[in-house]
């Protein structure tokens, strides 16, 4: 249990280094990863069930050639596409937001550095160190958060497009 206490203390120290903007970045990254994990679980479970249900419903139709049947097919594919792509735009937005929040942390950290310089001059290096860490740590955290999300949002987007295309190809209009 000592390792857990040490880990929590290290996280607390890291969060205090970056100032208040780092907390916002941490929440943003946490929400992004919750949605990413939800999408991954969806692709492994519910999506397969939905795809199979749509396929079975389509194959059980006695007639698949009329205009009405083709419209029903398009509706089924559209609903599947909507369900499969749900949340991906939010993930993309959060990925784009991470570096911007890091930049905000840089600006707020530099403001505190300039405040220290205005009060005590440029000779007080220790007083400026807190502002410098507030400027650099959120920038790094924002970039790490964005990089971690970029790869997975790309994979999720490709997988969603592939699954929709596969369902579309499997719903034949011959019969």
Image: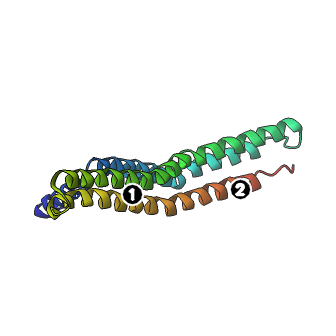
164 is higher (above) or lower (below) than 65: below
Disc 2 crowd rating (10 Å Cα; few below 14, some 14-19, many 20+) is few
Placement of the N terminus among the 4 image quadrants: bottom left
Report x, y in % for residue 165: 71, 56
- As drawn, is 65 to the left or to the right of 104? right
The percent coordinates of residue 64 (x first, y second) are 84, 43
Rendered residue at 41%/49% (across/down): 34
Image disc number at residue 142: 1
Q: Is residue 100 visible?
A: yes
Local secondary structure at mark 1 = helix
Q: CA distance from mark 1 to mark 2?
A: 34 Å
Q: Secondary structure at mark 2?
A: helix
Most foreground residue, 33 or 175 = 33
- Residue displayed at 46% across by 58% down: 149
| Mark 1 or mark 2, whichever is nearer to me | 1
Q: Is residue 132 left or right of residue 97?
A: left
Q: Nearer the viewer, residue 89 or 146?
A: 146
In the rendered structure, which disc, 1 or 2, sits on the residue that comes first in sequence?
1
Q: Give the residue at x 45% y 63%.
A: 147
The residue lying toward the viewer, choosing from 158 and 147, is 147
Q: Is residue 63 left or right of residue 74?
A: right
The spot of residue 58 in percent (x, y) is 75, 44
Question: Seen from this angle, which residue lies furthest left?
Answer: 2
Residue 16 visible somewhere in the drawing: no
**Res. 99 image quadrant:** bottom left
99 to the left or right of 77: left
Q: Which residue reaches farthest top?
A: 68
Closer to us: 19 or 9: 19
Rendered image: mark on residue 165? 2
The x, y position of residue 22, in whole percent, is: 30, 52
Q: How is the image coloured?
A: rainbow
């Amino acid at each position: 249990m000592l390792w857990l206490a040490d880990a929590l203390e290290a996280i607390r120290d890291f969060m205090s280094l970056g100032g208040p903007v780092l907390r916002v970045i941490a929440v943003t990254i946490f929400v992004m990863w919750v949605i990413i994990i939800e999408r991954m679980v969806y692709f492994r479970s519910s999506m397969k069930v939905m795809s199979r249900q749509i396929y079975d419903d389509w194959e059980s139709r006695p007639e698949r050639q009329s205009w009405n049947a083709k419209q029903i097919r398009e509706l089924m594919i559209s609903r599947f596409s909507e369900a499969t792509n749900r949340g991906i735009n939010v993930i993309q937005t959060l990925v784009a937001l991470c570096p911007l929040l890091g930049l905000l942390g840089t600006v707020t950290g530099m403001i505190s550095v300039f405040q220290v310089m205005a009060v005590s001059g440029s000779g007080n290096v220790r007083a400026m160190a807190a502002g410098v860490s507030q400027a650099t740590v959120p920038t790094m955290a924002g970039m790490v958060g964005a990089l971690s999300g970029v790869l997975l949002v790309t994979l999720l987007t490709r997988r969603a497009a592939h699954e929709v295309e596969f369902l579309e190809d499997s719903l034949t209009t011959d019969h």
